[in-house]
Amino acid sequence: MESYLTAEISADAVLHNLALLRQGLSPGTKLCAVVKADCYGHGLDLLLPVISRQADCVGTTTPEEAIHLRDQLKYPGPILMFFSACAYRDGLELHDALRELIARQVTLTVVSPAEVLAIAEAARHVNVQARVHIKIDTGMGRSGMPFGQVGELADACRRAEFVKLAGMYTHFATADGPDKALAMEQLRRFLSAADGAGGREGLTLHAANSAGTIDLPATHLDMVRPGIAMYGYQPSDDMHTRLPLQPALRLWGRLMQIKDIPSGSSCGYGLTYVFRRDSRVGLVPVGYGDGYFRSLSNRSSMRIRGRDVPIRGRVSMDQIIIDLTDVPQAQIGDEVEIISPNPTAPHSVETLARHADTIPYEITCRLGRRVRRVLV
């Protein structure tokens, strides 16, 4: 049975974007494709075979995501888990989780010496060496060991049996902004911390997110970690470099009702829109329950039969009213394009994000479970 809503995910667009990102890398620099949060809402199960053709490894967040990659999707390559498993669970559950991850050769992130002991014990129990990367906080103030204290953690990793310190990484706070000074200071702190914690030999050092990969070649180091750019969206409007990325997502549904509205009538919760002429309206089966922001009420548009038509009234949980007055030939069952893959369209991910005062990441990550995703 066809779903009310279909998200078409373009394999060609993702491959195009990965190829563009790779073109800017030096020989030998690896690409870690960030596939967390269901590939930013695009569908991990669909896209992993596509991404695997261009990526050297994948990055994810939770134990469930990592184990799904290995067990259900049979991904054979390196997996880097960004969250510390030790912060995720405790007690017996923690040890069970660590054993499962280490047995599946998932590379773990560590942010404190105490975690190393738990990882070493779990690795000894399954008789598999645990590979770990140290996350260093160089100025974002989020996760990671403070950059001035990395030596103790690195020593703990190197002393522990069944633990292999394989890498160190950091994350930029402002690489997507016009002023790169803080990002470059973060890079300096990161490299200094690595050098002061036993040196870089035998380690994979990585710092560049999508913005760093595109705009800051000096941050590429041994590996880059693009996320949003893989799916076709610019990290921000303030980038110095804008690659010709191709958005991978197109969302559509079918017109499910049409009716005539006399001038002076109002519509939607709160009756926030008043029709100034006799009008014809249609109903589209999408709403904030599917990830379409309520803040787009009376502000955005959709496309039907080649015409852009405005949204009228408030976005409901699963219904939106569109104005069909200027598309008299529209019929029930017509395809309505809700999100366009054209970045310049009035209903593109980028444009919707601006209208909703948010970022493209949130628009795609919010796509709900009722949306059928298909690879095209």
Image (cartoon, helix red, strand yellow):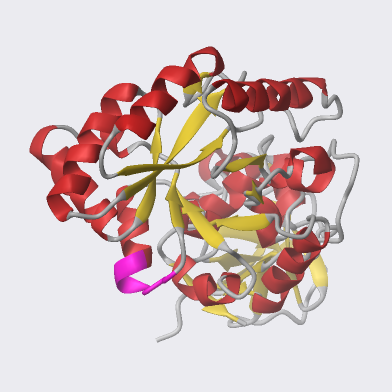
Q: Quadrant of residue 183?
A: top right
Q: Quadrant of residue 132?
A: top left
Compare residues 169 and 74 and report the one nearer the observer. Answer: 169
Where residue 160 appears, as percent x and y from the top left, is: 28, 34
Compare residues 147 and 90 and report the one nearer the observer. Answer: 147
Q: Quadrant of residue 217?
A: top right
Q: Residue at x 82, y 62 (%)?
A: 23
Taking the image as drawn, is residue 300 in sight? no
Region of the chain picked out in magenta, as a range: 70-76
Total number of numbered labels?
Answer: 0
Q: Is residue 190 above or below residue 359?
A: above
Answer with left or right where residue 65 lies relative to residue 266.
left
Where residue 93 appears, as percent x and y from the top left, is: 13, 41
Answer with left or right where residue 320 lies relative to residue 176.
left
Q: Is residue 72 magenta?
A: yes
Quadrant in which the N terminus appears: bottom left
Compare residues 334 and 246 and report the one nearer the observer. Answer: 246
Compare residues 315 and 41 and report the one nearer the observer. Answer: 41
Answer with left or right where residue 63 lies relative to residue 234.
left
Q: Residue at x 30, y 39 (%)?
A: 85
Where residue 61 appears, as percent x and y from the top left, is: 42, 46
